[in-house]
Structure formats: C-alpha cells, structure tokens
Image: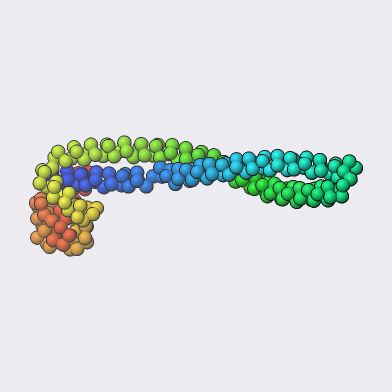
Amino acid sequence: MSEELASLYDIQQADTEIARHEEALSDLDAGAGLAAEIETLEGELGDVRKQLEEAENENLDRELEAKTLEEKRKRFQDQLYGGSVRNPRQLTDLHQEVEMLGREIGKLEDRMLELMELLESLRAGISSREQRLAEAETQLEAVRAEYERKGGRLRERIVELKAERRDHAARVGPRLLKRYEQIRGRAGNLGLVKVTGRNCLGCMIDLPQETVKALRAGRSGLTCDNCGRLLLWGEGGEAEQ
Ligand SMILES: [Zn+2]
C-alpha cells in the first residue's frame, strides 16, 4: 500500500478527532444562560430597589402630613370643646374644619395602608431575587470552572492533534492532500475510505472489480466512481496500525 495514502489516512483520523473535539468544545456550557439570568435579576433588583425607595419616601411624607393634620385637628378640637369660643358662627366653622381634617387624615391613612402593602411586597420581591441571584452566581462559578477545566483539556488535545496532523501532512504530496481536503469538504466526514471488501465504505456502493484489483495491487490515487472519495486498500492499512 502506498505510504502516502497511509499517511493520508492518518491525517483523516486526526481530522475526525479534531472535529469531534471541536464539537465537544462548542457544546460545553460556558454559562451564558446563567449570566443572562444574573443580568436580568440585577436589572430587576435595581428597579425594585428604586420603587422601594420611592415608596419609603412617600410613606415618610404621608406620615408627616398626617401628623401635621392631626395636630391641627387637635388644636381646632380644643378650641371647639374648650369653651373659649362662644360665637355660633365660629363654632360652626371650627366644626367644619375638624370634619374636613378628619376626611383628609382618613385619605392619608388609606394611602399609608396601601403603601404598607406595597412596601411589604417590594421587600419580598427584593429578598427572593437576592436569594436567586446568590444561587445563580454560585452556579455560574461552578459552570465556569467546569468549562475551564473541560475546555482546557479539549483545547490541549486539539493542539496535539493538529501537531500530529502536521507531521502526517509532511509525508503527503500537496496535490493529493488538496484533493483529499476538497473531497472531504464536499462529502462531509470522509475524504478517503479504506476498502476491505467489495464496496466503498463511504457510499456503500459496490466497486468495479478492476478497481478492487488495482487497489489490492497497491495503486494509489483511485477514487470511487459513485461518491468521488479517495480509496485505500484496507488490509495493509489495518495490519500497519
Ligand atoms: Zn463511494
């Protein structure tokens, strides 16, 4: 068997291994999903914290307003029931003021009740997001460490395989190598197939008897009429490995 074809076969094996390792590398989880989730959570946390701050500020304002109105009402009530004011008109005015302040205070109290519920739900939202964020960060760290570990190993192996391929390629003429690469590029996985029986193992079609004979006799550069792949007599190849 042609030494050149045997080396070409080694190149093909290296190519197959390189492709397998590259695929495994691209299939590795680099943590993009978790990173996206973390980014979303951080964005949401920023929004919810801002809402919380606004609600807290509004609550303080409302408390202060209510306190001010409460004091005012107390003053009017003291005047109303203290006996110092006797003029009926003034008493009616005071009475109306006290009623109006009562309604305003009631509205403020309703709003403060709403705010209390809002604050509670915002705080719960922050707490659940913070919890998930911490989990996701831990998970991402683990996923990234795994990615580095597995990816590093795969990349190292790819470098080795490429060096092996270069060694084999040095033993193959540039024209044959180019032909192999073209066929491989066109046919997908295989550019060169070993023939061990009657058929081409690339396309499974029976080869003409003359082709098999010529292969057996050690002729190189033969291709399958059907799929165009380069052919290599397999027995010698198997024995050499
Ligand atoms: Zn074929």
Residue 51 sits in which quadrant? top right
For the view shown, which residue lies furthest in the right direction?
83
At 72% from the left and 50% from the top, the residue drawn is 107
193 to 78, vertically: above or below:
below
Residue 209 sits in which quadrant? bottom left
2 or 143, which lies in front?
Answer: 143
User: Where residue 58 sits: x, y (%)?
Assistant: 64, 43
66 or 128, which lies in front?
Answer: 66
> Can residue 194 be seen?
no
Q: How many marks?
A: 0
90 or 104, which lies in front?
Answer: 90
User: Where residue 18 sits: x, y (%)?
Assistant: 27, 44
At 16% from the left and 51% from the top, the residue drawn is 182
199 or 28, which lies in front?
Answer: 28
Left or right of 18, for residue 93:
right
Left or right of 29, for residue 64:
right
Specify the quadrant that holds the C terminus: top left
227 to 95, vertically: above or below:
below
At 60% from the left and 42% from the top, the residue drawn is 54
> Can residue 189 be seen?
yes
User: Where residue 192 sits: x, y (%)?
Assistant: 18, 52
User: Where residue 201 sits: x, y (%)?
Assistant: 22, 57
Left or right of 232, for residue 24:
right
At 51% from the left and 42% from the top, the residue drawn is 42
Query: What is the basis of the colouring in this image?
Result: rainbow
